[in-house]
Amino acid sequence: MTTTATRPGSARARAAIAAKTLRTDRWWFAPLITFVGLSAWVIYATVRVFMHKWYFVETYHYLTPFYSPCITDRCVPDAAHFGTPLPSFWLIPEAAFTLPFLLLFRLTCYYYRKAYYRAFWLSPPACAVPDGHKTYSGETRFPLLGQNLHRYAFYAAGIISLINTWDAIIAFRSGDGFGFGLGNIILVGNVVMLWAYTLSCHSCRHIAGGRLKHFSKHPVRYRFWTFASKLNARHMMLAWITLGTLALTDFYIMALSAGWFPDLRFVG
Ligand code: FES
């Protein structure tokens, strides 16, 4: 039976429904897929980051994004574009300067927040399904208060995308000249998707066009805001695509570096 409970001072309160949810569709499917997908990616990335090998193909200068920039003194000299200021200790990843910022960027991303709040914390698992917790404080307390750092993580992610772009450019060097293979296509494709994801960020959109009173007086910002808005509509898709391209790029470079198969070369 459905009754309506009213709270003093509230014009309309929620209906008191005995059933946990009235939804009869497979509402649990999306959070389940998200849980499996994100867990698999995190396990793969963690294993790779602490493997400390098979991250660079010397012949073609392919460096996996999981190890870029390579800055421990374990790094192959040609892969260390920014020097090697850190010692080699197995708990220190080769990309120790960038990985924490990338992690912060993804963890505080508006889309990923929705994804892991639903799939991991069940808070709530889906629309019109009760929260898995008795109390709810939103993002008003530590540690979730830290989600506000997203804008700063966006700036760091922009710099890291520039570094990944540089990695993709110098990978066109083969021996002493120009070279081009399937690895280049994968590296460039990954960088393009990383830029699309980064520029589709809600913070990027706000930085471009937020707080403007007159778009007509800021035509350049307006154009960039329009561009970011179009990408922003596909932010969830780009979030998943980039997880895929990152894993694919890393796996391909690992396979070449380990000698599992050769690169498909078109030039050089
Ligand atoms: Fe997802 Fe900024 S909102 S990266």
Image: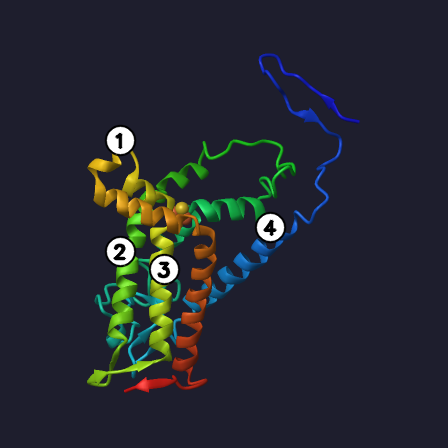
Residue that carries the numbered disc 4 in the rendered image: 31
Residue that carries the numbered disc 2 in the rendered image: 159
Q: Report how far apart the C-alphas of labels 2 and 3 lie in the structure.
A: 12 Å
Q: Report how far apart the C-alphas of labels 1 and 2 lie in the structure.
A: 29 Å
Residue 264: percent from left, percent from top: 39, 85
Given this view, does label 1 or label 3 mark the residue nearer the observer? 1
Q: What residue lies at 26% left-to-right and 31% top-to-bottom?
A: 213
Q: Which mark is residue 213?
A: 1
Q: How is the image coloured?
A: rainbow
Q: Residues within 10 Å of mark 2 (few under 14, many from 20)?
A: few
Residue that carries the numbered disc 3 in the rendered image: 194
Given this view, does label 2 or label 3 mark the residue nearer the observer? 3
Q: Report how far apart the C-alphas of labels 4 and 2 lie in the structure.
A: 32 Å
Give the amino acid type for the residue marked by disc 1 in the picture: Lys
Q: Report how far apart the C-alphas of labels 4 and 3 lie in the structure.
A: 24 Å
- The answer to the question of whether label 2 and label 3 lie on touching residues, with beta carbons closer than 8 A, is no
For marks 1 and 2, the one nearer the N-term is 2
Given this view, does label 4 or label 1 mark the residue nearer the observer? 1
Q: Secondary structure at mark 2?
A: helix
